[in-house]
Image (tube, rainbow, N blue to C red):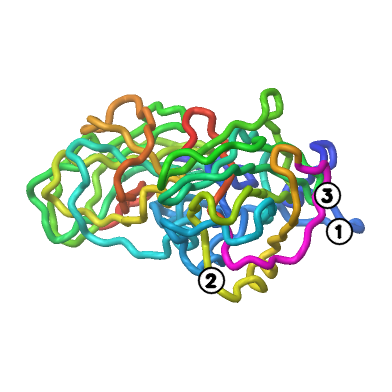
Amino acid sequence: MSRPVGTRAIATPPVLTAASRCALGSALRMVSSVGTGASPWSDAANALLAFPFVLERDTTFYKGFWVNGSAAGGNSEVGIWDESYNKLVTTGSVVGSGNSVPQAAAFAAGATPRLPPGRYYAGMAHSATTTGQLFRWSNTGANALYQAFGCWRQAGITLGSLAATATPGAMTNIGFPLFGLISRSVFDV
Amino acid sequence: MPSSATRHLGNPRGPIQGLAFPPSYRPDAVLVGTWSWQALADDITGISNTGPGAAAWPIANLAIAYPFELTDYFPCRKVWWVNGATVGTDSADVGVFTEAGARLVSGGGTLIAGASIVQEVDVTDTLLTPGRYWCAMSVSGTTATPQRWQPSVGQARAMGVAQMATAYPLPSTFTPAALASTAVPLCGIASRTLVA
């Protein structure tokens, strides 16, 4: 069987998270594994946390998602920012629903972005610190690691009305939520 | 954001100061499995950070599939999985589906035999083109103990893993549904003979 020459770029994973090879990948092992149950949002209410990722191919993202813990609650919002922190698209503010399972939310109608290769950020904001459990990485003292990975944080945002341009700051929390972007249209998560 | 017009193969942001960058290119390995960089390598390590273990299949005739990507053309000559200690009872099937769910190649179902080995099944040589796929494994019963990861359901779903009930042998169409079991199979495809 002959082998034609292949392509020169790696396809985007259909489900992209901070652990994907085009994001932070297995470097997250340096922090911890993902807690699976009863960890609340570990940052201040109404904070936005983001991780960097790269695309080698044009990619259309249809939905964002996060993983609820044993007691879903609060409101969450997932979005994409470009390298200059310009907001490209978000899910809007969505009430947490469904315990211990992923929750997907479509990007705004007509706004499913087809992004060219480049560098981007995926971010998640949450409304509360005590309402709603989330799957997340957690390790006390890991702020510097998250920051070394390229993650950033913005406090005092308004869910459902995130600014057109984010203002990134230093990481101050001890946990990073498991959330991501979905680029397959046949099934989400 | 770079526009398509300014992109440069291997360097999406374009040449810098006149330097010509070689195109980025990483050929696919001789075999692709759950652990491969094109599949869940980083996801498993970064999210659940556990190794596989032998355990009974969660539900008879259940298919569990993980997503993977091919950068290169891949001649699929074998499908494979890894047996645990308990064999000789159930049968297994491994196959590749398009992201939309169309079956491209599968083993058709084979008795699980040979404790604690890689078991391969010859398939019709099929040239897979670069793109995104599902690799699915289905087992006919719950006695055999194939190797599999056991992240939580939420972790596995965040890796992109899905399932399909009543799918042994693997059907012509894989219809993904939300994973409900803590099982991510250790299986894959090969472009060469592994052990036969």
Kindly identify the amino acid type of the residue bearing the numbered disc 1: Leu
In magenta, the rendered stretch is A162-176
Read off the residue under disc 1.
B19
Kindly identify the amino acid type of the residue bearing the numbered disc 2: Asn
Q: Position of residue B10 (x, y in %)?
A: 72, 51
Q: Chain of mark 2?
A: A
Secondary structure of residue under mark 1: loop
Instruction: Tell which residue pokes out farthest to the bottom in this image.
Output: A141
Secondary structure of residue under mark 2: loop
Q: Position of residue A15 (x, y in %)?
A: 53, 43
Read off the residue under disc 3.
B14
Q: Earlier in the sequence, mark 1 or mark 3?
A: 3
> Can marks 2 and 1 be said to lie on one chain?
no
Query: Which is closer to the viewer, label 3 or label 2?
Result: 2
Secondary structure of residue under mark 3: loop
Read off the residue under disc 2.
A139
Kindly identify the amino acid type of the residue bearing the numbered disc 3: Gly
Q: Chain of mark 1?
A: B
Q: CA distance from mark 1 to mark 3?
A: 10 Å
* Front in this rendered view, residue A72 or B59: A72
Residue B196 in view of the camera: no
In the image, residue B130 sits, relative to residue A118, either above or below, namely above
* Left or right: A150 in relation to A4: right
* Left or right: A183 in relation to A53: left
Neighbour tally class for label 1: few under 14, some 14-19, many 20 plus, Cα within 10 Å: few
Residue A89 highlighted magenta (yes or no): no
Q: Chain of mark 3?
A: B
Neighbour tally class for label 3: few under 14, some 14-19, many 20 plus, Cα within 10 Å: some
